[in-house]
Image (cartoon, helix red, strand yellow):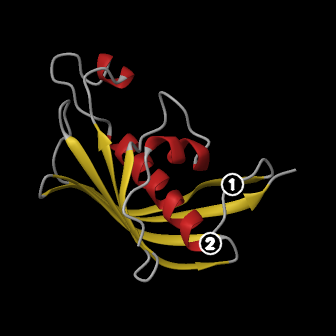
């Protein structure tokens, strides 16, 4: 088990950058159970809060799902013992059963939990959920794929 991956290692593993990098720290990875727990610190400085919504800022659900996908990518790279290179891309292939249970607001800390259920031929299936404290904010089944690009 790896106890933590800090932002510097995350930046080495993911191609995302501000304002679209949505994982601040990986708290734990367990290769045996193929699980990962990460955090996203939600601050009022996020650019999406200017328009979503000005009188009552709420993190867009699609960005919560993106944060989970980024956490899933970090787990996939760890399980495979590889990193992305310039000839490979990792992206969403599907989202099933997404359910939003509570709003996520500035000041919240979003805990991202992902479990790799299976992978074959570059296709990865994950169970994912995000919590604020002990409260479920969103859950979904994610399908992601890793493909070579020309």
Expressed as whole percent of the image width and height from the top left, the position of residue 124 reads 56, 71
What separation in Å lies between label 1 and label 2 (alpha carbons)?
11 Å
The residue depicted at 47 percent of the width and 27 percent of the height is 19
Residue 83, quarter of picture: bottom right
Q: Is residue 107 left or right of residue 52?
A: left
Describe the element under mark 1 as helix, strand or loop: loop
Q: Give the answer, above or below, for where 57 lies relative to 37.
A: above
Q: Exactly how many numbered labels are in the figure?
A: 2
At 59% from the left and 63% from the top, the residue drawn is 77
How far across and down, in percent of the image, does residue 93 sit? Answer: 58, 60
Image mark for residue 80: 2
Secondary structure of residue under mark 2 = helix
Q: Is residue 94 left or right of residue 85?
A: left
Can you see residue 32? yes
Of the numbered discs in the image, which one, if any, rests on residue 108?
Answer: none
Please say if the residues under marks 1 and 2 sit with CB atoms less than 8 Å apart.
no
**Label 2 Cα neighbours within 10 Å, binned few <14 / some 14-19 / many ≥20:** few
Residue receiving disc 1: 84
Task: Specify whether residue 115 is in view.
Answer: no
Q: Is residue 144 above or below residue 6?
A: below
Image quadrant occupied by the N terminus: bottom left
Q: Residues within 10 Å of mark 1 (few under 14, many from 20)?
A: some
Q: Residue at x 44, y 53 (%)?
A: 5
Quarter of the image where one finds residue 32: bottom left
Residue 101, position in %: x, y?
17, 53
Using the image as rendered, state which of residue 81 and residue 99 is in the foreground.
81
Q: Residue furthest left?
A: 134
Can you give x and y, in whole percent of width and height, for residue 96 in the image? 41, 64
- Tell which of 111 and 147 is nearer to you: 111
Looking at the rendering, which quadrant does residue 130 occupy?
bottom left
Residue that extends furthest to the bottom in the rendered view of this protein: 32
């Amino acid at each position: 088990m790896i106890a933590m991956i800090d932002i510097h290692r995350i930046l080495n593993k993911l191609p995302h950058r501000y304002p679209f990098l949505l994982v601040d720290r990986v708290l734990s990875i367990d290769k045996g159970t193929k699980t990962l727990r990460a955090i996203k610190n939600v601050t009022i400085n996020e650019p999406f809060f200017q328009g979503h919504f000005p009188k009552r800022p709420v993190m867009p659900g699609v960005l919560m799902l993106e944060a989970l996908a980024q956490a899933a990518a970090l787990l996939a790279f760890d399980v495979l013992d590889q990193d992305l290179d310039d000839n490979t891309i990792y992206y969403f292939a599907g989202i099933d059963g997404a359910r939003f249970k509570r709003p996520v607001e500035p000041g919240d800390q979003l805990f991202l939990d992902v479990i790799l259920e299976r992978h074959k031929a570059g296709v990865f299936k994950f169970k994912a959920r995000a919590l604020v404290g002990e409260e479920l904010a969103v859950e979904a089944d994610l399908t992601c794929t890793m493909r070579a690009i020309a």
